[in-house]
Image (cartoon, grey):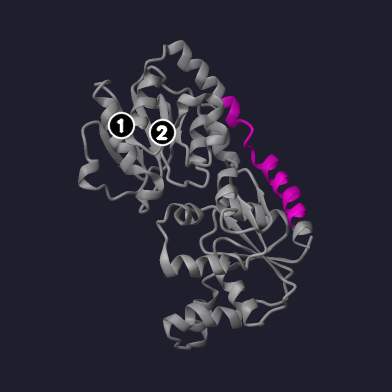
Amino acid sequence: MPRTLFLYYDPHYLHAAFAQSIGADFLSSDFVTNWTKSKRIQIHKKILGVLAPSFLLPKDYDIYLCEGSFILPVIAKRLRLQSQRGKIVNFIADPLVYYLHTGVITGAKKRVLLNLLRSVDGFVCVSEMEKKLLHEFVDKPAIVVDPFVPDKLYNEYVRISPNLSSKEIVFVARGPDWLYKGVDLLVEGFSLAKKEIGDLKLNVVGKWEPKKNWLVDGVEFVGQQKSLVPWFKRSSLYVHIGRGEAFGISVLEAMLSGLPAVVSNWTGAKTVVGKLGKNFLSDIRAEDVAEKIAKYYDLSLAKRKALSKKSRSLALEYRREDKVELFKERFKNLVAEMG
């Protein structure tokens, strides 16, 4: 395996596990700030953020595997401060390509980002949706790797028996990017569904500062929780209406717990959820979200139990050891394709 440096900001456990599996060395993207502090060097923030990394980035690696930090090796390469043979690979696991696609990012910022992205040699996407969006803008080798549920959580969730006769919905995410997570659409869609199903309740688990118009009847923001187990146990449905959600591992966690899930067509986990049927995939419209929720609660308890069993069966495939092996195989193919 080529000598690889994993360059991260705050590493997601998924990316860290993949990087570790190929024997990568780890380096935080904060290394520049830490270095200047240790040397007591005062550098203007703009210079520190652009030029300093180019000079300080280690130069003897074959591959720079980046967690959204691709700008650092791209600049270093352009300034010829490292070998032109070194390859840059970036994880695509955030809303960047969706925001480029939908025009959330425009103008000069879009042009600069695209210019930098096109200097990356290869990409690791966490869903087919991300790969498709990426290839609208960048014609470079890309692989899709599946996420996984960590072993400890996997073993906890697989033993859960959800309360399928309840009228409680759960959603798990943390802020502040409510647009990406679709919190506004979720709350609005829930409110419309509640007009038909009076005793419906929505629990939003995670750290948020709720907007006033989200604090509607039946919605509770319960904050960060030590464990999701109690929330999955008491619920009968999981709903996640992401706008460009790269995958949504919480969807897998809920399904592993036996909760059927409704997700948007712009949530990477739709490749799994779609196997439950078309009524579990929603458009980015509150009215459609409400319709999908209402249709689920129109089902008999027997049908909900069958969907619960199928949800768990689909999520069982997302084990750590299997997905790490899959990554190693596909990453090897990516390296070969980059040349």
Q: Is residue 248 above or below residue 111?
A: above
The picture places residue 41, in percent across and down from the top left corner, at: 48, 88
Q: Are marks 1 and 2 in contact (CB under 8 Å)?
A: yes
Query: Which residue does the image show at 55% across and 70% down from the upper left?
Result: 71
Real-space Cα distance between discs 1 and 2?
A: 10 Å
Seen from the viewer's position, the closer of residues 125 and 21 is: 125
Name the residue type under label 2.
Val
Using a 10 Å C-alpha cutoff, classify the residue at mark 2 as few (fewer than 14 neighbours), some (14 to 19) or many (20 or more).
many
Residue 256 appears in view:
no
Using a 10 Å C-alpha cutoff, classify the residue at mark 1 as few (fewer than 14 neighbours), some (14 to 19) or many (20 or more).
many
The disc, 1 or 2, on the residue closer to the chain's N-terminal end is: 1
Residue that numbered label 1 is attached to: 190
User: Can residue 329 be found in the magenta stretch?
Assistant: yes
- Locate the C terminus by quadrant: bottom right
Q: Is residue 284 above or below residue 125?
A: above
Residue that numbered label 2 is attached to: 239
Query: Which residue does the image show at 50% across and 21% down from the upper left?
Result: 308
Query: Which residue does the image show at 47% across and 57% down from the upper left?
Result: 100
